Amino acid sequence: RTPEIDDCQCVCVCVLVCIYFGRWLIEGSPYVVLIDVGFTAWSLDRWKSELWELCDIGVPWFDREANDAVLFGFLTAWLLGEVTQCEDPPHVVAHFHEWLAGLGLVLCRQRQLSVATIFTTHATLLGRYLCAGNVDFYNNLAEFNVDKEAGDRQIYHRYCLERAAAHCAHVFTTVSQITAIEAEHLLKRKPDIVTPNGLNVKKFSAVHEFQNLHAQSKNRIQEFVRGHFYGHLDFNLDKCLFLFIAGRYEFSNKGADIFLEALARLNYLLRVNHSDVTVIAFFIMPARTNNFNVETLKGQAVRKQLWDTAQTVKERFGKKLYESLLVGQLPDISKMLDKEDFTIMKRAIFATQRQCQPPICTHNMLEDSSDPILNCVRRIGLFNSSADRVKIIFHPEFLSSTSPLLPMDYEEFVRGCHLGVFPSYYEPWGYTPAECTVMGIPSISTNLSGFGCFMEEHIADPSAYGIYILDRRFRGVDESCNQLTSFLFQFCKQSRRQRIIQRNRTERLSDLLDWRYLGRYYTAARHMALAKAFPDTYLYEPQEPTSTTGFRYPRPASVPPSPALSRHSSPHHSEAEDNDEEERYDEDLEAEKDRVNIRQPYTTPFKNKSPGNFICGKKKLLQSSMYSPPL
């Protein structure tokens, strides 16, 4: 405020800037400040003019998201300015994420506020648009005319906001090494440090129960499959593997195209090798629909009717058995079921007759003829026929426990599957394979995803831990598809015991993805920003790692549900355990493997090339806590 502003105008400003303060209802209950941009919409034209005068960035009137970004940016800069003008101002670190928040950072630097700034891009805006256009992105990063490409896609003003924030920030970060390369070419600044995304592992943690949860959720998926394939249930559900891909419906970016092609080739391999394994691949990607498919709903109704019929016959059988035992006679099995019972069962069997194939899609699609997944299915010819060893189910909605079709939450569904397949072409990080990992479910990702690069960096042999890394950067599409098919076929050849052991190894990687460890990268970024913004007060000296020997588990965090070294308790053991001699599970040996194969998460921070900024008037020494030993 200045003396020129009278009291009436001050009151007007206070009324029209609406700020809410409270606690976020998540674990830890952190404080949160919410700014309502709608209350300041009347200032939009004035602030857009000021943005043009200061930065030569013009925002068109029709871009609502960019207009909101302008409002939020100016309000954020105003709020931080008020904080820094206190009587005893604190040293403020402001961390801005993505282009939508970036204008606030630019204004903080332009107004020379006493604030240390960090900007994180989780995926560059131009990178998303380019990959959505099916271009050879990673092989031509250095060749793109970024201004022209952004202008052709009518996002030049958004691109300018993102690039300005990246260059104005004291510290620029991104979420993975692959995105760091992308940002260096598209935003023209190399990230100072990579800050990988973590998970709240405690939320997913089930300790020794995760194998039991897998079995429970798998049974619920099997019930859905029984209904979906009624009349054509000519495969053994106990030898059925559930694969899935989930996420936004970006057909090429998310790798649905290469997954479908690999499924067609896997189907051929399973048939020519006379495999008794059946693969059911779920596609959980939201698309435009108008309702559930009638045939799919009918299948679940038929399944329930069969269950009710079986329960009725069982009760009648049990009553007759009970009466026979009461009079001291052994039951005559031929007389336990009368003609009425057989009539009821014959009616139930007749109701399961079906003339058509089981449906591919569970919903009625609004754009069936142009849908990429359905068109690809038509091309490869996987129509859920009896001869196919690979079946496809396309569920074009996110999962919900209230669904009448597949009443499961996403977390429950993931736990019930055997393998998550995410062969993405553009995936700056990849939460879906990370969530599979912390729930003990093996997954396939690529070396073009942040998660895949992170796992390659920190695990000597990722595939042994159920993390299959597909090479999509240095291979052609056909070669990558063949490699994916090989991964899937090798997974199908595993015995049940081998899959159990692999799930245990996968679940033990949870600590690599825990915020307890990955949060240290954010701590290092903030220390670096403080040292750059307040060189007279702070000095940042990254501490070099002393060891890469891993987490040193005294014993594996998870063990198989039964002793691996014991012999079969009876001569009638499971066929799935016939190959147990090939794969034994020794806890001490597994712990030793972890010490050798798993490296603790670290990355040497990017050191400032001008150390003179760090050596004058030192009052406080900041050392990175990234390399502290695991808790």
Image (cartoon, rainbow, N blue to C red):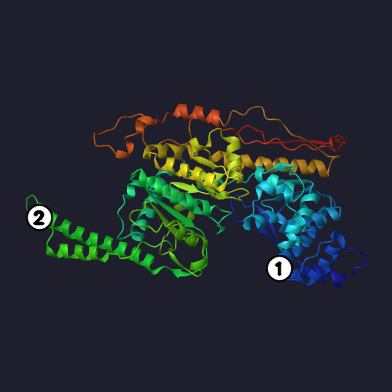
Question: Which amino acid type is shown beneath numbered disc 1?
Answer: Arg
**Among the two numbered marks 1 and 2 on one chain, the one whose residue lies closer to the N terminus:** 1
Q: Nearer the viewer, residue 287 or 629?
A: 287
Q: Is residue 496 left or right of residue 305?
A: right
Is residue 545 shown above or below 529? above
Q: Quadrant of the C terminus?
A: top right
Residue 234 lies, in percent from the top left, at 30, 54
Residue 25 in which image quadrant: bottom right
Residue 518 lies, in percent from the top left, at 63, 41
Q: Is residue 123 left or right of residue 164?
A: left
Residue 264 lies, in percent from the top left, at 44, 51
Q: Residues within 10 Å of mark 2 (few under 14, many from 20)?
A: few
* Residue identifier under label 2: 334
One can see residue 85 in this view:
no
Q: Nearer the viewer, residue 474 or 22?
A: 474
Residue 504 tag number: none
Q: Which residue: 67% across, 30% down? A: 545
Residue 365 lies, in percent from the top left, at 48, 68
Q: Nearer the viewer, residue 200 or 474?
A: 474
Q: Quadrant of the N terminus?
A: bottom right
The reply to whether discs 1 and 2 touch (Cβ–Cβ < 8 Å) is no
Element assignment for label 2: helix
One can see residue 602 in this view:
yes
Name, please, the residue furthest toward the right.
Answer: 4
Question: Which amino acid type is shown beneath numbered disc 2?
Answer: Ser
Q: Is residue 241 left or right of residue 171?
A: left
Compute the Cα span from label 1 to label 2: 75 Å
* Residue identifier under label 1: 64
Q: Residues within 10 Å of mark 1 (few under 14, many from 20)?
A: few
Q: How many marks?
A: 2
Element assignment for label 1: helix
